[in-house]
Each structure stands twice: as structure tokens, then as C-alpha cells.
Image (cartoon, rainbow, N blue to C red):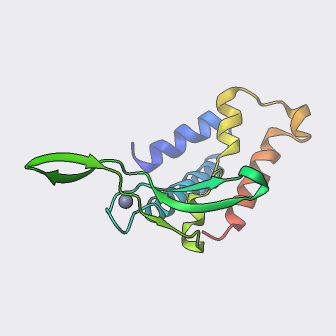
Amino acid sequence: MGLKKRIEKYAKQVNCKLSIARKRVRYFDKLEKRIEQASICPKCGKSSLNIESDDREYVFDSWVQCTNDRVPYVEDGEVYFTDCDYTADVEDKYIPLSFGYGYDIVLSFAANGRVDEEMLGESWESFVLADTEMLLKEAI
Ligand SMILES: [Zn+2]
């Protein structure tokens, strides 16, 4: 689907102006690209890096790990698959991978039909506008 079509569809789904839909679609496209780039594993080259974490015993630890478990290797003339197992420390460049980053709350509310102006405490229009302004302030 072309960009123009996607913007029109988004505006319809979310019930907002085309100018707002354009900003939001472009923002999430850019974000998706950033996540894609951040997820490329330097060892196997696949877009399969994830942020893993462990919060057992009151110690919160997180790291970057490759989830590719289809790395081929040959043993006795047969091809097997193994885990890539690449891990790294969480650095700034991996921030786009963190859970919830770039979550489109507006689209999610609209898709669930959970548009309750009383719950939002404001009109849908101003909620969408405020969320869009907040997204555009984030440096991506
Ligand atoms: Zn890998």
C-alpha cells in the first residue's frame, strides 16, 4: 500500500485529520526503520536482536540477545541449526528495541473501540493531537 493510501486509511481508522495521520504514519515508519536497524545482529546479520531481562531475586538485569536459532552448521556432512547466542550490553543504540517503545496508543484505542472521552478526560480530537505532539518531540 502506498504512503498516501496508508495515511488515508489511518485517518479513517483513528478518525483524525489527514494532516495528523500523515505525521503519525511518517513517525511510526521512521521508528520501525530505527527498530529494524537496531535489531540487526552483528554476528549473524539477521534482524533478531531483542532486549532480554531478568528480575529474579530483586536484581534487575537486562542485556541484548540474538534470538536467531536457525544458524546453520555442518557436522559429519549434515546441516544442523543452532542458536546464534550473540549477546551485548544494552547501549543507547539498542534503545529502540526496548519494550513499548513506539507503541501507538491512539491506533490501539481506536482499533479496540475503546474511545471513551470520559475516561480520556478530553475530547478524542485533543487526545490524538496531544499524543501526536508528544511523539514528534521525541528525538528519533
Ligand atoms: Zn545473531
Which quadrant of the picture is home to ligand 1?
A: bottom left
**Position of 51 compared to 60: left or right?**
left
Q: Which quarter of the figure is the N terminus placed in?
A: top left
Q: Nearer the viewer, residue 59 or 24?
A: 59
Q: Would you identify the image quadrant in which residue 17 lies?
A: top right
In the image, 75 versus 99, the foreground residue is: 75
Q: In this view, does 117 lie above or below 77?
A: above
Is 132 above or below relative to 91? above
In which image quadrant can residue 108 be found? top right
**In this orientation, which residue lies closer to the viewer: 96 or 32?**
96
Can I make out residue 42 in this image?
A: yes
**Figure quadrant of the C terminus:** bottom right
Residue 125 spot, x, y in % from top left: 78, 43
Image coordinates of residue 78 in percent, x first then y, are 11, 46
- Identified at 92% across, 40% down, the residue is 121
How many labels sit on residues?
Answer: 0
Q: Can residue 30 be seen in this view?
A: no
